[in-house]
Image (tube, rainbow, N blue to C red):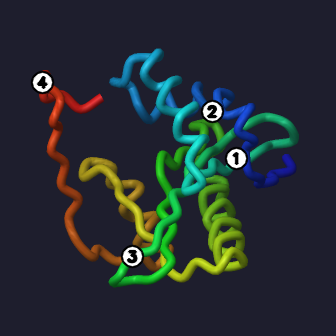
Amino acid sequence: MEITFKTIKKEDILTVLPLLRKLNTTTPDTILKERLLEMTTYNTYECIGAFDNDKLIGISGLWYSLRHYSGKSVEPDHVIIDESYRGKNIGKQLFNWIYEYTKQKGYEVIELNTYTGNRKSHKFYYNEGFEIYGFHFVKVMRKDKKLY
């Protein structure tokens, strides 16, 4: 097993769908594809892949911003490691790669959100030195009031 990390090219972004679908089970496929394709058009987003040889086994989106309270900030998003590779330190390796990669780009702070029920991720992020700074609120403005 040789694990490597690299950015996923815009033209290859749909290769992340099988892993992303394990994390996001509610968004219809057509909408998920549309959103992924649109996200790659923003200069503030890129996707990182973890690979076992050529097999995609993990992903993390990265959102870049400048915030008045923290400076140049990056937010890992939709972080997932394939179930068969969990417990092998790949998440830690992925985050170490992200730390170095984003530091080299001049980013000063990493912020992220995690679902309240995802306790395994909470433990992971605490062990990585993250602290709870605030709450993430969501207001759905669509007529159906559903989040998907």
- Mark 2 and mark 1 lie on one chain; the one further toward the N terminus is 2
Q: Which residue is mark 4?
A: 143
Numbered disc in front, either 3 or 1: 3
State which tag comes first along the sequence, 3 or 4: 3
Q: Amino acid at mark 2?
A: Val
What's the residue type where badge 4 is placed?
Lys
Disc 4: CA contacts within 10 A as few (<14), some (14-19) or many (>=20): few
Label 3 vs label 1: CA separation?
26 Å
Q: Residues within 10 Å of mark 3 (few under 14, many from 20)?
A: few
The quarter of the displayed image where residue 85 is located: top right
Residue type of the residue flagged with mark 3: Arg
Left of 75 or right of it: where is 135? left
Disc 1 on helix, strand or loop? strand
Which residue position is annotated with label 1? 49
Q: Give me the disc on residue 67.
A: 3
Residue hosting label 2: 16
**Image x and y of residue 117, in percent:** 26, 48
Query: N-terminal of the two: label 3 or label 2?
Result: 2
In percent of the image, x 44 and y 35: which residue is there? 23
Residue 95: image quadrant is bottom right
The answer to the question of whether label 2 and label 1 lie on touching residues, with beta carbons closer than 8 A, is yes
